[in-house]
C-alpha cells in the first residue's frame, strides 16, 4: 500500500512513543551494520509490510520485502529483510512488529470471513477501532478483502439509535417519528444516508422516509429475511441496501450471508483482533 504524508506522520509518532528520549540499551552496542529478518510464526495474510519498510527507512535502514501486503505467508516465512545499523534496527524492532502483527491479524481474520461470503455480499469494518490506529486498522481490512465503510463522522450521515433516542426525548416524538424526522431532514444533504433500525417496522419507516442503506441491528438471519420480505411486499426494496450488523462472527456469518443482506459489518475484525505471532531474528 502507498505510504502517505499522513501515515508517515503517524509512524514517526509510533517510533517516538517507543524510543522516548533514546534507546539506552541500544546505545551499548558497537557501531556496525547487521541484517535482520522478520518472520511469521503463523499462517497469515500479510498487512502492514509497506509501513514497516517506512519505519525502518525513517531510521536509515534498507528493506527487502519478500511477502508484500495482501500475500499469503506460511508459518516460518520471512516477510521482510532489513539491513542497517544495529542500533537503528533494534530501535525500530518493537514498533515494526507491533504494527505488522496487528494489521496482519486484522487482514487474516477479514480474509477468513470474506471467504465465506457469496458473490455480491461484502464485509465491512466499523468505527470500533483502536484510537489513533483507525487508518491502519481499516487499511488492513481492505487488504484482507473487506471494505472500510466510513472512516469519520464527516463522511456520511448514519442515523443510529442514540440519535433517535435524543431526538425523541427533546422533541417529544415516538421513536419511529423521530427516526422519520431525522431521515427526512437529512435526505437533501450530500453524501450517503444510512439509518440503523432494531425492528421490521423501523425498516419500513426508514425506507419510506428515504434512507438508501438500512442497518438491521442485532437481527437474527431469520429476522433479516423477514425484514427483506416485508420491504419487498411494500415495494420498498429497490434501491435500498440492507446491512446486517451486530453479533456477527465466523460461526454465523454464513447464515447472515444467505439471509439476503447486501452487506455485513463486523466490529470484531478490528476491536477483537488477535495479532499474528511474528519475530525478528538477526
Image: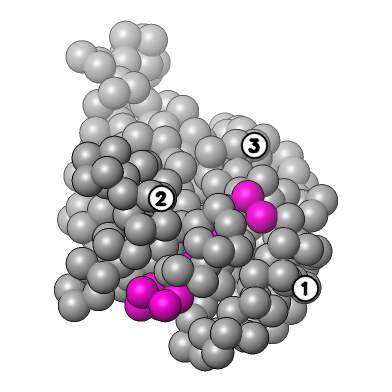
Q: Depth check: 15 or 180 in front?
A: 180
Q: How busy is the neighbourhood of tag 1: few (under 14 within 10 Å), some, or many (20 plus)?
A: some
For the magenta stretch, what is the residue range?
207-219
Which residue is denoted by mark 2 in the rendering? 175
x and y percentages locating residue 119 in the rendered image: 69, 83
| Pointer 1 with pointer 3, Cβ within 8 A | no
Which residue is denoted by mark 1 in the rendering? 258
Which residue is denoted by mark 3 in the rendering? 274
Query: Left or right: 54 with respect to 249?
Result: left
Closer to us: mark 3 or mark 2? 2
Q: Depth check: 59 or 200 in front?
A: 200
From the viewer's perspective, is residue 112 above or below residue 169? below
x and y percentages locating residue 233 in the rendered image: 64, 86
Going from N to C along the chain, the mark reached first, 1 or 3, is 1
**The N terminus sits in image quarter:** bottom left
Which residue is at a point 25% across and 17% down the rendered structure image? Answer: 20
How far apart marks 1 and 3 lie (CA) works out to 27 Å
x and y percentages locating residue 235 in the rendered image: 55, 89
Q: How busy is the neighbourhood of tag 3: few (under 14 within 10 Å), some, or many (20 plus)?
A: some
| Total marks placed | 3
Closer to us: mark 1 or mark 3? 1
The image quarter containing residue 178 is bottom left
Query: Left or right: 24 with respect to 94?
Result: left
Amino acid at each position: 500500500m502507498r505510504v502517505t504524508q499522513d501515515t508517515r506522520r503517524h509512524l514517526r509518532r509510533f517510533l517516538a512513543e517507543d524510543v522516548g528520549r533514546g534507546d539506552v540499551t541500544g546505545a551499548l552496542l558497537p557501531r556496525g551494520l547487521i541484517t535482520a529478518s522478520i518472520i511469521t510464526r503463523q499462517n497469515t495474510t500479510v498487512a502492514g509490510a509497506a509501513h514497516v519498510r517506512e519505519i525502518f527507512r525513517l531510521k536509515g535502514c534498507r528493506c527487502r520485502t519478500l511477502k508484500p501486503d495482501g500475500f499469503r505467508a506460511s508459518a516460518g516465512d520471512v516477510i521482510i529483510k532489513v539491513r542497517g545499523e544495529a542500533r537503528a534496527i533494534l530501535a525500530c524492532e518493537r514498533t515494526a512488529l507491533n504494527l505488522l502483527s496487528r494489521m496482519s491479524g486484522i487482514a487474516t481474520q477479514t480474509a477468513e470471513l470474506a471467504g465465506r461470503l457469496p458473490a455480491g455480499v461484502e464485509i465491512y469494518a466499523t468505527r470500533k477501532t483502536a484510537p489513533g490506529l483507525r487508518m491502519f486498522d481499516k487499511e488492513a481490512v481492505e487488504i484482507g478483502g473487506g471494505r472500510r465503510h466510513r472512516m469519520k463522522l464527516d463522511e456520511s450521515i448514519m442515523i443510529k439509535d442514540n440519535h433517535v433516542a435524543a431526538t425523541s426525548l427533546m422533541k417529544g416524538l415516538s421513536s419511529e417519528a423521530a427516526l422519520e424526522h431525522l431521515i427526512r431532514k437529512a435526505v437533501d444533504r450530500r453524501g450517503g444516508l444510512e439509518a440503523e433500525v432494531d425492528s421490521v417496522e423501523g425498516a419500513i419507516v426508514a425506507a419510506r422516509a428515504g434512507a438508501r442503506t438500512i442497518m438491521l441491528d442485532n437481527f437474527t438471519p431469520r429476522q433479516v429475511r423477514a425484514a427483506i420480505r416485508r420491504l419487498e411486499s411494500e415495494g420498498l426494496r429497490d434501491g435500498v441496501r440492507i446491512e446486517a450488523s451486530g453479533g456477527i462472527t465466523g460461526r454465523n456469518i454464513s447464515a447472515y450471508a444467505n439471509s439476503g443482506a447486501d452487506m455485513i459489518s463486523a466490529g470484531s475484525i478490528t476491536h477483537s483482533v488477535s495479532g499474528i505471532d511474528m519475530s525478528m531474528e538477526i
